[in-house]
Image (cartoon, grey):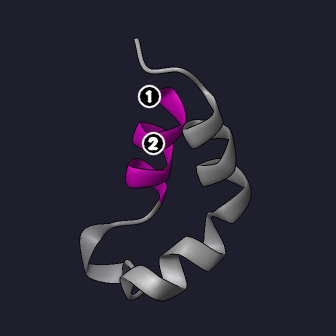
Amino acid sequence: MLCDRRISKQIPPSAAPPPSQKLLTVAPEAALTIAAPLP
């Protein structure tokens, strides 16, 4: 999951928003990640 790793690097754990807010923030990326088949 390159997208997932990229998001993790861009958003430090200490600066990460609440889960609900994070889902709204990365919705486009999450949609692509979920749509992509797992390796």
Quadrant assignment for the C terminus: top left
Which numbered marker is on residue 1? 1
Q: Position of residue 4 (x, y in %)?
A: 45, 42
Lateral position of residue 3 relative to residue 18, left or right:
right
Image height check: is 16 above or below 2? below
Q: Look at the image and give the residue range highlighted in magenta.
A: 1-10
Left or right of residue 27, residue 21 in this image? left
Q: Which mark is residue 4?
A: 2
In contact (CB < 8 Å): disc 1 and disc 2: yes
Above or below for 7 versus 15? above
Q: What residue is shown at x 54% (from left), y 37% (from top)? A: 3
Secondary structure beneath disc 1? loop
The spot of residue 33 in percent (x, y) is 57, 38
Magenta stretch: dominant secondary structure = helix
User: What is the crowding at mark 2: few (fewer than 14 residues within 10 Å), some, or many (at least 20)?
Assistant: few
**At x 64% / y 35%, what residue is drawn?**
35
- Residue that extends furthest to the top in the rendered view of this protein: 39
Front residue of 34 and 22: 34
Task: Name the residue located 40 percent from the left edge and 39 percent from the top edge.
Answer: 5
The amino acid at mark 1 is Met
Going 67% across and 49% down the picture, which residue do you hit? 31
Q: Relative to 33, is 14 above or below?
A: below
Pick whichever, 6 or 38, lies toward us: 38
Give percent across and percent down for residue 10. 48, 56
